[in-house]
Image: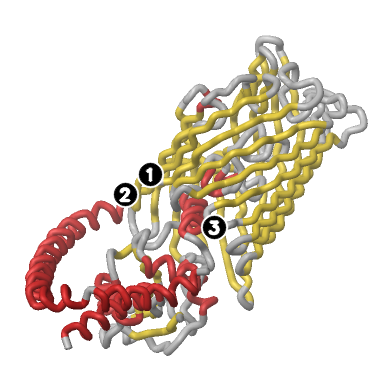
Amino acid sequence: MKRVHIFSAVLIVLFSSISSAEIAIICNPSVSITGIDVNTASNIFLGKSDDLGGGIKVKPIEHEEGNDVKIQFHKAVTKKSAAQLKSYWSRLLFTGKGKPPKEVFDDDEAKELIANDPSLISYIDKASADDSVKVLLTIP
Amino acid sequence: MMKTQIKISPLFILVILACFSNVYAANTSELEERIIALEKKAKKTEQKNKRKFDSIKRKMAKSEDRLRISGFMSAGLTKSTDKVESFGVTFPDEFAFDPDSMVGLQFDYRISDDFSATVQTIAKGGDYWDIDAEWAYIKYQKANNWYVRGGRLRLPFYLYSESLDVGHTYPWARPPIGLYQTAVSTLEGLDLFYSFDTMGWKHDIQTYVGTSKDQIAVATLTFDITINDLYGIVYSLSNGPWLARLATNRFTFKLNNSDIDFNGEDIIKTNNAALKYEDENLLISAEYGHSYARNNLIANSSESVGLTTGYRFGQWMPYAVHVSNNSLDEKPTSPTPSSGRGNTLGIRYDINSSVALKVQTEHLYDFEGTQGPFSPNAGAEEAVDIYTIVIDAVF
């Protein structure tokens, strides 16, 4: 039996590293909106807009660089590589037009911030989502 | 290719594991105990670190929130086939570090919820490493979609004018010669920024008013430049990968040199249009600039066109640029007119997200008997090639 367990453990590890996880865009449960589209998310996370829809203003919370969740999120939502994203924000920062969002260390920190502040929006690995936050959009 | 590997590897490991299953079985329980013990230890350390980290972070958050320090730098090697000079920057005929090297530091300080102060200082190799404040302003921003700034600002002539010194923000090793070089790059005054959305399109409007002072070296003489009654407006329209930009401005332009008792004045009007498409892979940008000098005594009317295209293959992006500029006056006067064309080929390699390496060759030709894009008496006769290797970083 133990052998079987180890086999399946090895298989799970192998497969989980291959298939990428789903990403969940999250906000505070008290926010009255139930969902957003990719375009809206892209505009908010690039600082082009702060409107979640229906006049609800939000500020994005980013993940630190090198984080897999961040790479996957931007590939799907803002369609920018890490270097392109850096160029984008450098251009805004060094011309005084905008500042990159605050960054969190991990999903737990993102959830903690979101759970305590309805004016924030962030994203996490779907598997980390729980009752403390509301999922606005799931990105496969 | 990837897919076949993915399908094969678990199977392959299964076979291997099956072969050595006896060894595994014997040691499994012992191994499991060890793993559990190690996991416990790791978790404890992790929690301890997290507490430490949180405490440091809380302490830092207060000061970090108020002051932000960021910077950029370029370290380049440049060689020209002829020694030439363009707007104070000399391109020597042997590899030199100075023309394309610079370092910039920016300090953003939040004064209150609505007010912030920013200073950006730049030291350029081409400028003998003198430290200049390119930006120094107070910003008032009450809402996300508008702000007012007062102080020293960059002049937003062209698409990339405001971030010309931050190499990481554009594909080229250097802004194309003949398109982006201007006698002045900053203004002292005010600007107002306002943006709004219509059906997914974002509209940005930036207006500015001010004055400017600088110096320009022409051969052995240094002239004082005074710019007054400067005002302009920039309108940008963007959606996803698309960006369109229109800019116009006007100013009075004075040149003085007390040694030779020279005083000249003109009124200049400039108009610019740009269109850019940039997605995950493809970059295309086209710019057109028109500059009109009313008196045509110390400045000439001219027009310039620039086309850039690049394609990203992962971290690599080869790019090509064509620039053309023409003097529009029938009887050009002083300073000598500037016409010419330029072709650039290069490649950008993103070493990581913050550091890029660029290698390019810029061929400048067809000067039509003028000084080309270079300073008078320091220009080349026919054609010039400029080779550049540069590393651009932001931090």
Q: Which residue is mark 2?
A: B67
Q: Quadrant of the N terminus of chain A?
A: bottom left
Amino acid carrying label 2: it is Leu
Q: Residue A123 in the image: x percent, y percent?
A: 37, 74
Which residue is found at the position 31% from the left and 82% from the top?
Answer: A127
**Left or right of B123 in this view: B257:** right
Upstream in the sequence, badge 3 or badge 2?
2
Of B139 and A47, the residue lying toward us:
A47
Q: Residue furthest top?
A: B259
Upstream in the sequence, badge 1 or badge 2?
2
**Left or right of B6 in this view: A79:** right
Q: Secondary structure at mark 3?
A: loop
Q: Residue A115 in the image: x percent, y percent?
A: 27, 79
Please give the label number shown on residue B314.
Answer: 3
Q: Which residue is mark 1?
A: B107
**Does residue B98 appear in this view?**
yes
